[in-house]
Every structure is written in structure tokens, then in C-alpha cells.
Image: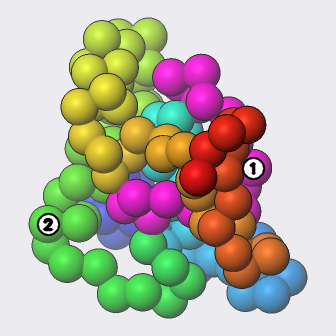
């Protein structure tokens, strides 16, 4: 939210080795945060759903979506019911049975028996 208000440079958020930083990094971490708040803690290199790829441009609809996630995850105690409902109802943020491992560059099942 700070970068949208012009109060922070998105290039200061991320991992500097390998230039893993910027808007896409912030957005993907919001999805990880929402999952973790719903007791689904995954590896930082697990990708799914709404997570943009490194350097990917985002549409205004995507910015609005991530603004909403940022607002909700800023005060999770006050918004926990809404966070849980969003996680359950929106496949863009709900962790699927198979995620993409960005380090190994391949899909990986999370649970035994997953396809």
C-alpha cells in the first residue's frame, strides 16, 4: 500500500541477490501471507494462482486485487473472517494440490496422492 501511495519504492522490497524485487515480489508475497493466515505455509518459491512472474506487468484490476489483499492482511486480527472467506472462495489465492516450484521450474504436488 505504501508504494501505491507514492511513499515507498517497490524496488526496495525483495531479495537483492538475483534482482528478485519489485511490484511482482510484493504481490506474490501478499498471496503467500494470505495462505499462511489460513494455515497453509508454503515455500517462498512455490507459485500458484494470482502470483505474477518476475517483471510481469500488472493490469489495473490486478492492482486493485492486490490493494485489497494488502489492506486485509495489514490488520489480520480485525479482518480474519474476511481473509478466510476470500481464501476459501477465490481460486486465485487458494493453494491448489499442485504448485509450480520456481527453483526447480516444474509443477509439484503438495500432498501424497496429488496429481
Q: What residue is rendered at 50% in x and 79% in y?
A: 53
Residue 61's disc number:
2
Q: Is residue 96 magenta?
A: no
- Which region shows up in magenta? 36-51
Disc 2 packing (10 Å; few <14; some 14–19; many ≥20): few
Judge from the rendering whether residue 52 lies leftward or rightward of residue 82; answer left or right: right
Q: Position of residue 45 (x, y in %)?
A: 72, 62
Residue 70 appears in the figure: no
- Report the residue at 25% width, 40% height from top: 90
Note whether residue 16 is visible.
yes
Q: Main secondary structure of the magenta part?
A: loop
Q: Position of residue 22 (x, y in %)?
A: 54, 77
Q: On residue 107, which mark appears?
A: none
Query: Residue at left 45%, top 64%?
Result: 51
Residue identifier under label 1: 43
CA–CA distance in space, label 1 to label 2: 27 Å
Amino acid at each position: 500500500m505504501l508504494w501505491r501511495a507514492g511513499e515507498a519504492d517497490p524496488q526496495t522490497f525483495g531479495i537483492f541477490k538475483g534482482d528478485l524485487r519489485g511490484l511482482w515480489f510484493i504481490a506474490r508475497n501478499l498471496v503467500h501471507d494470505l495462505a499462511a493466515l489460513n494455515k497453509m505455509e508454503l515455500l517462498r518459491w512455490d507459485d500458484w494462482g494470482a502470483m505474477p512472474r518476475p517483471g510481469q506487468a500488472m493490469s489495473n484490476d490486478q492492482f486493485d486485487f492486490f490493494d485489497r489483499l494488502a489492506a486485509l492482511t495489514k490488520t489480520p486480527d480485525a479482518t480474519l473472517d474476511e481473509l478466510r472467506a476470500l481464501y476459501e472462495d477465490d481460486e486465485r489465492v487458494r493453494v491448489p494440490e499442485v504448485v509450480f516450484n520456481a527453483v526447480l521450474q516444474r509443477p509439484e504436488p503438495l500432498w501424497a496422492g496429488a496429481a
